[in-house]
Image: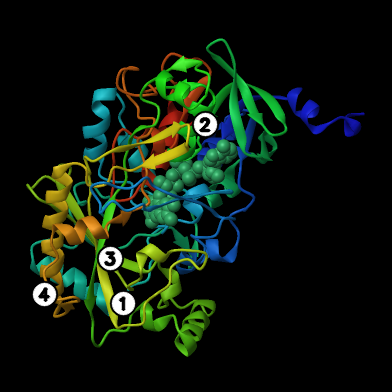
Amino acid sequence: MTGSLPRAMILSTRSADIAIIGAGAAGLELARMASNAGQKVVLFEQGVSNGRHLFQRIPLMVGKIIGNKRFVDASESVAQVAAGNRQLPVLTGRGLGGSSRVNGNVAYAGPVERYGHVFTPLGLDFADILKRMNTGDTTPRPHSWNDALSAKFLDAAQALGTPKVDDPDAQGAFAGGSILHVNTKRGLRHNHLEGYRDTAVVENIEIIRAPVTGIAFDGTRATGVTSQNGTIQAGEVILCAGAIGSPLLLMQSGIGAADMLAAAGLKTLHDLPYVGRHLKDHANLRLPFSCEGHDTLNQKTRGLRALWEGLKFIAGSKDTILRGPGASAGVNVAMGGDIIEDSYRIQLVHFTQDRSAVGDKGIVFERQQKASLGIYALWPKSQGAVRIGAQGVQIDPGFLTDEADVQTTLQGMKQARAIMAEMGFEPDPQEAPDEDTMRSGVYSGYHLIGSNRMSMDADSGVVGPDFAVHGLTGLSVCDASVLPDHLSSHSYLPVIAMARMFAQTRGWAA
Ligand SMILES: Cc1cc2nc3c(=O)[nH]c(=O)nc-3n(C[C@H](O)[C@H](O)[C@H](O)COP(=O)(O)OP(=O)(O)OC[C@H]3O[C@@H](n4cnc5c(N)ncnc54)[C@H](O)[C@@H]3O)c2cc1C
């Protein structure tokens, strides 16, 4: 009989223990753990991609799809007043795996001391979760690609006082230089999506490919999820739509600052002023240098050289550029001696590109014999917001709006020039970069966090330490948006750590 009913009616009669919105890094990991704990899960995902496209598997090829709307939602930020008044690209992934399927795949959970710094005031202890993550399970690593240029870079950094470490996630080792750790297996990307496919109890999970348009409520209790096809009832709704998608969906469901919602013509269900605030990212600057004697991706991705790299990859060689994300090594440097306070990162990037021109063709490498050093403040204090208004959505990462980040980045730029000189290479251009170079040159590090930050109360954030939205029942948020601050040089594994903490609070983790 149901075959003749409209789809909306079929959906509205169904129910689940848990509805998860967004099958990205956090959403898939939560679905995996909840399904193992015997929960019936409905998982909504707006994107159609299943994460298996070859360009989502071969680390370097991801650079070619990050402008492709099938895999990525690309928008422009509002003009960044402290960054040359430029509107900068904001990218987030879509489809199974979300951003974790189009990211650089560089995977660091971050130092346990930094988690203590951020989460002790909230009463959460991540030590056990990090210990388990760093001993393997769903995140095999490191299997990156590196070459003589990486060795030169790490040697130069060491000569200038930054020691080499094997694993920056080992206790006390975050301040140091290492070959990049990426989540790959036999040269192919292997992250929590493979973990999901291997160990989720799929009979307990129904995936619905549809954009969620709102969360249904009965008073202040979330009761289900509405998509274009109707509403599904659920015992608990968990929002995992990412640092842009999650605050937007809360706002579209009437949860946010009442004055902002009214200005946008939206009804207020629950006045929660911090929804969308405290958006953070890493403001990433790249300084190019000439590297005579070393071919970079600028050369190796063209003509017969590219064919040769492809053949080596197929033959299983570890020595091929396709195995890495285009960057191969990085150093974390503490300015005042303590890595969890004022610190910066310098990363060796084996190409140069016009960063304002990431479009349908993805990253386009330049032709010159050049590479670059990427620099960013590890724990930026600058913050912006995701807002909604009569004109639509506004994304403002607030790059370089805090003077402390300007000083930290300037220090990183100075050190990067010193490393280039120690490597025996020339910055190109030769003139020392100044504050203007930084302000007109930073781009998103694609590490968006914090727009529904975790806090003890509604006067300073959106969710409590149990991930429940302040003042509501039946609705939680667990994704990059709840991170109160940056925890590592990259954000993917910190998000997985959050998902595991969520599972622990619900008793699913075992
Ligand atoms: C280009 C790029 C490069 C990056 N490089 C790195 C890196 O090298 N290392 C690293 O550690 N981190 C990197 N990151 C960041 C990392 O991938 C993210 O921090 C992490 O994936 C965030 O996880 P999440 O679960 O919060 O959100 P996401 O993984 O973005 O998942 C959110 C999901 O929700 C879905 N969604 C959103 N709105 C709706 C809706 N209304 N209805 C249904 N579904 C919806 C989206 O389609 C998406 O699948 C990168 C990110 C990008 C975009």
Task: Work out whether residue 85 or residue 21 is closer to the camera in this orientation and state it.
Answer: 85
Q: Nearer the viewer, mark 3 or mark 2?
A: 2
- CA–CA distance between discs 1 and 2? 44 Å
Residue type, label 1 = Asp
Residue type, label 3 = Ala
| Disc 1 + disc 3, Cβ < 8 Å | no
Which of the numbered marks, if any, corresponds to residue 422? 4
Cβ of disc 2 within 8 Å of ligand 1? yes
- CA–CA distance between discs 3 and 2? 37 Å
| Disc 4 + disc 3, Cβ < 8 Å | no
Task: Mark yes or no: residue 24 visible.
Answer: no
- Element class at badge 1: loop
- Measured as percent of width and height from the top left, residue 40 is found at 65, 29
Q: Which residue is mark 3?
A: 329
Q: Earlier in the sequence, mark 2 or mark 4?
A: 2
- CA–CA distance between discs 4 and 3? 16 Å
Q: Nearer the viewer, mark 4 or mark 3?
A: 4
Q: Which residue is mark 1?
A: 147
Q: Which residue is mark 2?
A: 249
